[in-house]
Image: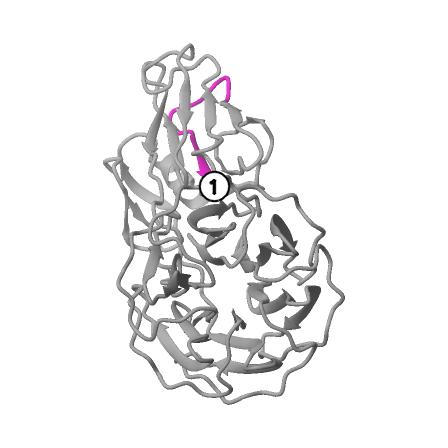
Amino acid sequence: MSGIIGSRLNVKGSGLVAKLGTDGQILTSAGAGLQAAFEDVAGGISWQSVETGSTLTAVAGNSYPIDTTSNACTITLPASASNGDEIIFTDYARTWGTNGIVIDSNGLNYQGDDDTNTVEYTTDGQSVQIVYSDATNGWIPISDEAVADVPDAPGNENGIFGYGNDGSVTAVTNLVNSSGVVASDVTGVGTARSHLAACEYGGDKGIFGYGAGPVSMTNLVNNSGVVGSDVTGVGTARNELAACEYGGDKGIFGYGDAGGSLSLTNLVSNSGVVATDTTGVGTARSGLAACEYGDDLAIFGFGTSGSNVSMTNLVSNVGVVATDTTGVGTARRTLGACSFGFDKGIFAYGRAGSTVSLSNLVSNVGVVATDTTGVGTARRYPGACEYGGDKGIFGYGDSGSQNMTNLVSNVGVVGTDVTGVGTGRSNLAACSYN
């Protein structure tokens, strides 16, 4: 009140004006009901706890975050209302597009229609603010806008390349800083191996897993880029698999070869615990790649099932793998993939009869684009990861055990070769950390 004492108070849209005394008391006013209007402004709306049920009985003066992740919600409005009563409903989890809300006006009119009409709101990110007017029009929405853009999830700043084959298997690693500069070799920790996969988990850490042998062991990477010792693996030992982050803080290993192509997956919790095998969906294959897109979704793509393929399989934000999507672009295997631009991805390089340097971008809704003529040395078995929060890097690979890198801008443009640092090798893996 201290900011308006002795001043004029205008209640927007009401045509009401008041003059306040030095003690905040209303001295003069124009327009009936000003005292009540002023009290409404001062009192505000009372925000309630998140509602997750399938039904809700609303109370005037309250605001309700409605979480429809598991079910739709039918909301019953008060049986009686007074002019100026107000209620707000908002899409807590951005799921109204899947499970919407239905409003039962409980005998009163809603926007001039009686309560025999169905009132639904089915847009992700929507908020609905309603005010009671009178018996004729009843409840009127004064705002029913949707927030179209969600904040971009902050990407990880740093990356790590690890393991691989330089004529013999190695456990050496190379850190990548937030500017995409690769550091010299760090003596590896854990069993030296090749043909493994790696992904992020926990929002800021990474995990290397599986590999030639085949084996099912894993090695965790902390948020300073330090690799942990071997952890006895869970699930089928295999190699030539792929891995990526999903759900914002979890990971998934998928597909691979164990004497024959597989389509199984293993989820990684946000604390780095690998789950038992989940029966796979889609064509069994190996030599594929995977990356995150759309902030919390993932995609497996390309590979070989006896012959090269370009099919993809999308992964939901709860780790469920979808059926095959007919691929776009050159069918190939032994390629790499990473995310860029906060919510998009890129597949690049690989072998399609011969090694190639072409790439395919992935939109923020998981649509794979046609081939883009590659930049840099054609090669297979590179590693790839995010860096700098919104950029990517492809590194190393087999075209004579290269140690070159190619940076990916935050709009998906692949840069020319950068002379590499560290041991040139192929069949390695990479992931980001923070």
Total labels: the figure holds 1
* Main secondary structure type of the part rendered in magenta: loop
Q: Which residue is drawn at 35% across and 19% down?
A: 134
Q: Mark 1 points at which residue?
A: 324
Residue 241 lies, with reference to residue 319, above or below; the image says below
Residue 216 is covered by the magenta coloring? no
Horizontal relation, residue 79 to residue 20: left or right: right
Q: Nearer the viewer, residue 219 or 254?
A: 254
Q: Nearer the viewer, residue 217 or 258?
A: 258
Residue 88 is covered by the magenta coloring? yes
Image coordinates of residue 307 in percent, x first then y, are 47, 51
Q: Is residue 294 visible?
A: yes
Q: Amino acid type of disc 1?
A: Asp
Badge 1, how many Cα within 10 Å: few under 14, some, many 20+? some
In the rendered image, the quadrant that contains the N terminus is: bottom left
Residue 305 lies, with reference to residue 242, above or below; the image says above
Q: Can residue 180 be seen in this view?
A: no
In this view, the residue farthest toward the left is 15
Q: Nearer the viewer, residue 408 or 238?
A: 238
Q: Residue at x 39, y 78 (%)?
A: 405
Image coordinates of residue 139 in percent, x first then y, are 38, 23
The magenta stretch is 78-94
Toward which corner of the image does residue 16 lie, by quadrant? top left
